[in-house]
Image (cartoon, rainbow, N blue to C red):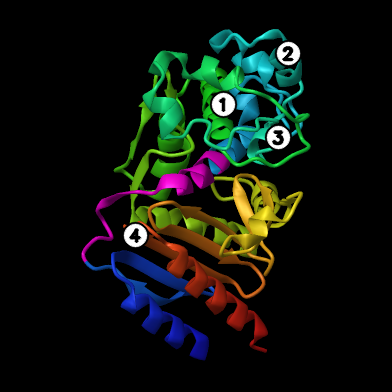
């Protein structure tokens, strides 16, 4: 792959690059470790990918926890004991489904909700109240608005059903089966942060993305069902409006806490220079950990690489 050679050269020119790999058809064609591959890294918004997988595992194991769940199950019944919503919000929150949270179509209009500005200026034990009383401008299921709130609600949801805090659930049902022993995840009040605050090593995160690829390609249900992984890879909901098309990867859809690019691949990127890309058409995974303050160049290089690969016959 000529494109891969060029991409590697460009990656190696970037400053603050810690670890990177390109996996093509299941084989590693490039690996940069820089002695950082087993160190814990803050993965920022790549945490959301792990939240999504945990929800998928919960759906698979619902009988174990004595509940009946589906993507269209409403969540308020399960979380209402942990927050008190005002009258207007209450009626709308009763309509919110698991899929709305996974698609970031909960109805909230505040894109900074559960970002640092929310967390630093509120008591940790009151954060769920802050979230559920934030303005709900849209009907649930209608409008995509990216924030950290949906994953925090899902964290509460998982804990209420299973009795395991989300980080504990992830350890038992995702990390340990993959042989991942060491990680950290921030806790806000009673609940795991969910959307951010996860620290994993590069090698550990690589196991997670390779699980996604393996289940999808081989149509198997190791740890998490193929049905959920297929939905995760293929079934994003179109984003209304064009404002997001100015982002480096040209996102046009979002679902199960991952973006879909105009070039037809899924991705998640973190504000600190973390990036996961999976192109199912060409069977390519790109995983990058860095500590870049401005990661637009990384995103642009990766986007160009994937598009060139798609043109290759």
- Marks 2/3: CA–CA distance: 18 Å
Q: Is residue 9 left or right of residue 216?
A: left
Q: Which of marks 2 and 3 is nearer the N terminus?
A: 2
Q: Is residue 1 visible?
A: no
User: For residue 15, what is the image quadrant?
Assistant: bottom left
Residue 252, position as x, y percentages in the image = 70, 58
Residues packed near mark 2 inside 10 Å, few (<14), some (14 to 19) or many (20 plus): few
Viewer-nearest of discs 4 and 3: 4
At mark 1, the secondary structure is helix
Q: Give the range drawn in magenta.
A: 35-52
Assess whether mark 3 and mark 1 are in contact (beta carbons under 8 angstroms).
Answer: no
Residue 29, position as x, y percentages in the image = 43, 79
Viewer-nearest of discs 1 and 2: 2
Give the residue displayed 55% in from the left and 56% down from the top: 212
Q: Is residue 10 left or right of residue 233?
A: left
At mark 4, the secondary structure is loop
Residue 308, position as x, y percentages in the image = 59, 83
- Marks 4/3: CA–CA distance: 31 Å
Which residue corresponds to mark 4? 292
Assess whether mark 1 and mark 4 are in contact (beta carbons under 8 angstroms).
Answer: no
Assess whether mark 3 and mark 4 are in contact (beta carbons under 8 angstroms).
Answer: no
Give the residue displayed 44% in from the left and 68% down from the top: 298
Q: Earlier in the sequence, mark 1 or mark 2?
A: 2
- Marks 1/3: CA–CA distance: 11 Å
User: For residue 189, what is the image quadrant?
Assistant: top left
Above or below, 39 against 53 in this view is below
Which residue corresponds to mark 1? 153
Please check the rendered image and state whether residue 50 is part of the magenta-colored stretch, yes or no.
yes
Which residue corresponds to mark 3? 100
At mark 3, the secondary structure is helix
Q: Which disc is residue 88 wearing?
A: 2
């Amino acid at each position: 792959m000529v494109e891969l050679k060029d991409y590697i050269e460009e990656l190696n020119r970037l400053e603050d690059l810690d670890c990177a790999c390109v996996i093509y058809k299941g084989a590693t064609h490039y690996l940069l470790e820089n002695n950082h591959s087993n160190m814990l890294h803050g993965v920022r918004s790549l945490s959301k990918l792990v939240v999504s997988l945990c929800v998928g595992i919960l759906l698979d194991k619902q009988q174990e926890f004595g509940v009946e769940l589906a993507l269209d199950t409403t969540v308020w019944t399960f979380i209402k004991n942990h927050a008190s919503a005002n009258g207007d919000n209450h009626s709308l929150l009763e309509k919110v489904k698991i899929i709305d949270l996974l698609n970031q179509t909960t109805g909230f209009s505040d894109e900074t909700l559960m970002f640092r500005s929310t967390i630093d200026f509120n008591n940790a034990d009151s954060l769920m109240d802050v979230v559920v009383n934030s303005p709900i401008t849209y009907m649930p299921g209608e409008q995509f608005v990216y924030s950290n709130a949906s994953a925090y609600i899902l964290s509460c949801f998982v804990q209420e059903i299973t009795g395991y805090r989300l980080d504990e659930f992830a350890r038992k049902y995702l990390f340990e089966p993959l042989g991942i022993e060491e990680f950290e995840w921030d806790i806000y009040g009673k609940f795991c942060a969910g959307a951010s605050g996860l620290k994993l090593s590069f090698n550990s995160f690589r196991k997670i993305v390779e699980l996604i690829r393996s289940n999808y390609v081989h149509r198997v249900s190791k740890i998490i069902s193929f049905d959920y992984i297929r939905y995760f890879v293929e079934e994003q909901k179109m984003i209304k409006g064009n404002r997001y098309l100015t982002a480096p990867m040209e996102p046009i859809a979002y679902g199960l806490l991952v973006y879909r690019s105009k070039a037809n691949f899924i991705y998640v990127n973190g504000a600190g220079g973390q990036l996961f890309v999976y192109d199912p058409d060409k069977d390519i995974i790109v995983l990058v950990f860095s500590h870049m303050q401005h990661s637009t160049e990384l995103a642009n290089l990766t986007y160009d690489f994937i598009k060139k690969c798609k043109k290759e016959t």
